[in-house]
Image (cartoon, rainbow, N blue to C red):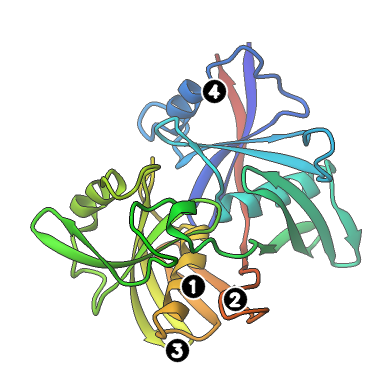
Amino acid sequence: MSIRFTKMHGIGNDYVYVNCFEESLNGSDVAALARAVSDRNRGIGSDGLILIAPPEAGAQADVRMEMYNADGSRSEMCGNGIRCVAKYAIDHGLAGNANGDSADIRVQTDRGVLLLQAKMSHGAVDRVRVDMGPPILRPVEIPVDVPGDRCVRIDVPVADTVLTATCLSVGNPHAVVFLDSLDAVDLGRIGPLMEHHALFPKRINLHLATVQSRSEVAMRTWERGSGITQACGTGACSVLVAGVLEDRLDRCVLVHLPGGDLTIEWPKAGDDHGGSVFMTGPATSVFSGVWPT
């Protein structure tokens, strides 16, 4: 038995994708498969495994996205990953309502059904804009084990330091720490300590961010279950939201990540904390192959 796959990335945040419209993983240990294919020395090499599957009955979606981190754990969402899901589904004719040089697609995730707008170039998807939905700000829903209605500028003791973080969820939990320099904290040492900190019942993604102007910010990421990654789409969304909540950033910013740039918008709608976050960025196919099982 073997499994056909495609490796794709969104600004360096790379995953192995399996088309479950054609491939069957019934009876497979998917968590073990995720660990095996993600191994950068003995496997394909990736930040995790994403399955592109038929949506559940009544979901009103075109496809379903099921995501596994490199350590085999499940994750609710991946902003870079969902752009690649849209590209694969549209480019391979699984879904997508085309209209000239653009196409719309609805993707079912563990966060719900999200609407994506793809821009085409030479008959293939080049860039994707994602409606990520409103950010989740209540600590109990993120979750973070602190009282109150918001997690803005909370002090988190880690090892021999205290990090001041703003926490939220964009379908998965994030902690954003603003610094004068991205090198001010050893991300490789502090990242796993924050990820498994007692304040975060479902672990956390940690982002270090440096504001360059009201409309521009740079960041680095320790991703829950994967470690240091080239990019994190939901993390970029979280950095913007945290920057707005801390009055550091405007509502539309260019985010610089090690793997490339994303445009993130949080238009004001309803009360000051309402409205969807929108993420726009590229999606790239790398290669396809067959994985023996």
Mark sitting on residue 263? none
Q: CA distance from mark 4 to mark 3?
A: 43 Å
Q: Of the residues under marks 4 and 1, which one precedes in the sequence?
A: 4
Q: Which mark sits nearer the N-terminus, 2 or 1?
A: 1
Q: Secondary structure at mark 3?
A: loop
Q: Which of disc 4 and disc 2 is earlier in sequence? A: 4
Where is residue 164? Give x, y as percent: 25, 69
Q: At x 49% / y 25%, what residue is drawn?
A: 31
Horizontal side of residue 171 vs 196, given as left or right: right
Q: Amino acid at mark 2?
A: Trp
The residue beneath circle 1 is 241
Residue linked to disc 4: 30
Q: Type of residue at label 3?
A: Arg
Label located before the other in sequence (4 or 3)? 4
The residue wearing badge 2 is 266
Q: Nearer the viewer, mark 3 or mark 1?
A: 1
- Of circles 4 and 1, the one toward us is 1
Q: What quarter of the picture does the N terminus occupy?
A: top right
User: Residue 171: where, in percent of width, then height?
Assistant: 55, 52
